[in-house]
Image (spheres, helix red, strand yellow):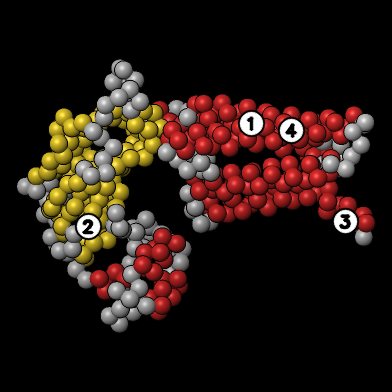
Amino acid sequence: MITQKKFWINKLPVIVFIVFISLIFSLRFLFEIPVVTLMGITRLFNYSIILLIIAASIKALRTQDDHLISPRVARFGTMLIILGWVVYVISDIYIWQTAKVFPIYFLALVNVPYAYLGFIIAQLLMLIGIILASYHSETPPGKYKKYTLVFGLSALVFVVATGLIGQPENQKADILLLPKDNTTALVGQNFETIVGVNTQNPINAVEATIKYPEDILEVISISKENSIFTLWVQEPSFSNASGTIEFVGGLTGEAGFQGMGEIFTITFKPKKIGEAKIDFTNAEILASDGKGTNITGKKNGMVYSIIDSKRQVYDFNNDGKVTAVDISILLSHWGTRGASKYDLNNDSRVSLIDLSILISRMGK
């Protein structure tokens, strides 16, 4: 029994590591969970493990003899781990304040250069701290001494590699269309589409033209109420005759804008059944760098399915209402890929998003 227990205790870090990595890969490739969400889970895992190491080390060292050099070195190492953890948190908060991204999420380290530097410093402090804490056999790093350096260096390499790989892509700014509700609409029932921008480099001006099928959709109004822009060279204007929307806008000040922001919201009215593709025919996004550098990245449009009956979309068993029966029918097609009437958000896969949409329609 003692030998078996010792075996599992010694192998515990490897077991935890393998299980966690397997879970992350399963969520990503089997359930197609977004990378940002997975990075958030990884970040929470990191925070939890570090806090456990700190708490266990402090508890183990409180009862040790101060006259021995081993506990002193281990105490100093524990202090470095705590300091690294604090720098880690501050870097996350800095991302939240500057890039408007929730701090626990690991959205491209180098989006905020100072945060990237902070993460490198934090990893170094914690790596050194864990090595020093392992000088005493009663601390967690001491118990798992043969794994400590490997995992510590792996974490550091991971942070550096992520930053370097993500650097070029982060120089671009994307303009995109987002649905307020979902991508299925009823004939005669208005729906809203958000025109937004996603950038981690400061921008101060955007110009674009949007094209929509004038035979299927007509624009009712455009709202700038929640716009990030304060200056309009050309106010957002539309022509239902040609099916176009044009605008030129920006904002004053040297700081510019970073993060995900709304430019304006379009209210459409569907006129007939069909597939309505809304896209950018041209777009230009300029950096707030004093040079007007063009950093235009992706131009993401979208497609709406216009139908004439709510029952066509949500009432799968045609009983005139959306109930638990319809949910069970959707679940029976869970994971189906390609075109399907159960794919309510038109992403070519029946998934959790479709279930959420259907649940929101229950009783309607």
User: Which is in the foreground here, disc 1 or disc 2?
Assistant: 1
Identify residue for label 4. 79
Front residue of 254/271: it is 254
Q: Position of residue 297 (x, y in %)?
A: 34, 33
Report crowding for label 1: few under 14, some 14 to 19, many 20 or more residues within 10 A (C-alpha).
Answer: many
Numbered tag placed on residue 191 in the rendering: 2
Identify the mark nearer the N-term, 4 or 1: 4
Front residue of 56/339: it is 56
Residue 20, compared with residue 189, is above or below; it is above
Q: Position of residue 213 (x, y in %)?
A: 15, 50
Q: Residue at x 92, y 31 (%)?
A: 68
In the image, what residue type sits under mark 2? Phe
Residue 225, compared with residue 94, is above or below; it is below
Q: Residue at x 23, y 53 (%)?
A: 192
Identify residue for label 1. 122
Report crowding for label 2: few under 14, some 14 to 19, many 20 or more residues within 10 A (C-alpha).
Answer: many
